[in-house]
Image: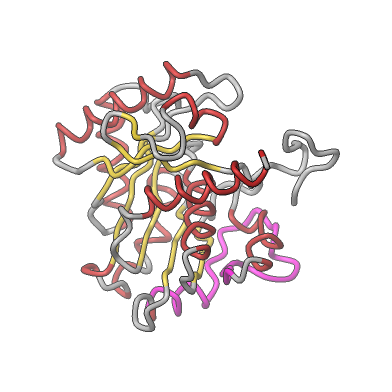
Amino acid sequence: MAHEEKRGSTQEVAASALEMLRRPVTILVGHFGSGKTEIAINLAFGLRRRGAEVTLVDLDLVKPYFRCRIAKEALEAAGIRLVAPKGEQFYADLPILVPDARAAARDSGASGARVIFDVGGHDLGARALGSLSGLLDRQATDLLFVVNASRPFAEDLSGLQSMLTAVQAAGRLAVTGLVANTHLMDETTRETIQHGIREARGLEAATGIPVRCCAMLHRYVREFGGASGTLEGLPILALERHVVPPFGLLPGRRSARV
């Protein structure tokens, strides 16, 4: 019974945060270690649970061990299409932009399907998005900047603004929303999350770009009112951890998920 209750609350939490995604195309950008990839994967699973046809495009050309393609088997088992390099290039530490990514950008939103792009960290990774920006329907696209105020060069408003500006310039698209996702991995506390929301709200006030939701691992959700709770007026996106490097382990597992 406890397992069933947890599963039900998981879906409710995801559903409340997914209400912010009204456009068929969602792009996740941000600084290194912001949590973009984990959020992208969780959004893909959440939309799929609601019956949407989902394509997840791995545009992270920067980090070899923290990419959506790490969760390939789970994504495909759920019926989510993953666009990423194939064969010997699948795990290659190379800046590979596959033709299918261009096709996904060109056709995104045309068939009623939902498309999520996970873009590499900072402006270096956003350059890949810049090469596709002309193919995207901007009226059908949400570009979400993930704020993790615990990362280097993102600890204050000045650093966050500089990074946001650099990412927008490199990606050639305007950010339409912010996602508060401040964490310290397993060292995260309630105060860490609340501090991150304050920093995201500060960026909102400075730029006029709204904070759409706050993200956190499931084990923190119950501290803020559970599945139906909100934090400072923001819906909570509860995250399952899917992305672990080959040398890391998921809690309770004897081997890493790759």
Q: Nearer the viewer, residue 77 or 160?
A: 77
Residue 43 % position (x, y): 47, 55
Quarter of the rendering containing residue 132: bottom left
Residue 234 % position (x, y): 30, 37
Q: Please give left or right for residue 100 compared with residue 110 in the image.
A: right
Report how many numbered discs are placed on residues in the image: 0
Q: How is the image coloured?
A: secondary structure
Question: Residue 83, relative to residue 158: is it above or below?
Answer: below
Quarter of the rendering containing residue 211: top left
Q: Residue furthest front?
A: 1
Residue 34 % position (x, y): 46, 37
Q: Please give left or right for residue 158 compared with residue 59 in the image.
A: left
Q: What residue is shown at x 39% (from left), y 73% (from top)?
A: 105
Q: What residue is shown at x 39% (from left), y 81% (from top)?
A: 107
Residue 106 % position (x, y): 37, 79
- Report the magenta residues as a range: 80-106
Question: Residue 4, relative to residue 142: is it above or below?
Answer: above
Question: Residue 24, relative to residue 236: is it above or below?
Answer: below
